[in-house]
Image (cartoon, helix red, strand yellow):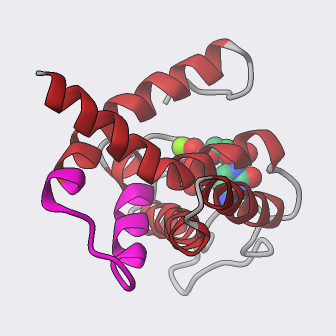
Amino acid sequence: MENIAQLILTSMIWVLPAYVANASPVIFGGGKPLDFGKKFIDGKRILGNGKTIKGFIAGIFAGSFIGFVEGILLIGFLLALGAILGDLAGSFIKRRVGIKRGQPFWVLDQFDFVIGALLLVSLIELPALEVIIAVLLITPALHLLTNFIAYKLDMKKVPW
Ligand code: CTP
Ligand code: MG
């Protein structure tokens, strides 16, 4: 039991740059959309207004900063960049299947960023299997909880 709590804690600390990268655009984002309002060949927005240039930059910087503080700058940078790219990929998919900006795509919304982070960081370091499992089990619950709190604090328009 103690070992499991330990594993969860170390896994969350390790993946924290991805969490911070994904959360910081809610605070520092907004403004010009990354896709510049452009549409894809299907006539729908490429990414939508929820993905902004400021959010993209803020996420990478904030996540990398956590990595720097943790003494794992390169890993932190890759986790942060991967999280942001995974989130963008999620929005790209949502727009393709016709889900409007801010509307939920359950499971995809909870996993896109953390899958992106794990994939990109794997270029330089493959995390231990138990760390991957812990991260994949904890992340969706944590994502739902933190989004609900952000909604209650009026930082987000929707609770997901
Ligand atoms: N955000 C941002 N830039 C990003 C990512 C997020 O500015 N690259 C901000 C936006 O204000 C966004 C909020 O963070 O509304 C929450 O992010 P998220 O839930 O990922 O976006 P959604 O608005 O739900 O858009 P989508 O439907 O594309 O997921
Ligand atoms: Mg969303």
- Say whether residue 118 is left or right of residue 129: right
Q: Which residue lies furthest to the right in this view?
A: 31
Q: In this view, does 159 lie above or below 125?
A: above
Q: Which quadrant is home to the N terminus?
A: top left
Where is residue 100 shown, x and y percent of the image? 54, 50
Main secondary structure found in the magenta portion: helix
Is 78 in front, or is 92? Answer: 78
Residue 154 in view (yes/no): yes
Where is residue 64 shown, x and y percent of the image? 66, 63
- Say whether residue 124 is left or right of residue 30: left
- Say whether residue 72 is left or right of residue 34: left
Residue 100 in view (yes/no): no
Q: In this view, does 53 lie above or below 69?
A: below
Counting every numbered tag in the picture gives 0
Give the residue displayed 61% in from the left and 47% down from the top: 20
Magenta residues, start to end? 112-132
Give the residue displayed 34% in from the left and 51% down from the top: 111
Residue 42 is covered by the magenta coloring = no
Where is residue 12 shown, x and y percent of the image? 40, 42
Is 107 in front, or is 149? Answer: 149
Q: Which residue lies furthest to the top in this view?
A: 152
Q: In this view, does 135 lie above or below 77?
A: above
Residue 125 is covered by the magenta coloring = yes
- Say whether residue 153 is left or right of residue 111: right
Where is residue 24 shown, x and y percent of the image? 70, 45
Give the residue displayed 60% in from the left and 70% down from the top: 77
Q: Is residue 91 above or below residue 82?
A: above
Q: In which quarter of the image is residue 124?
A: bottom left
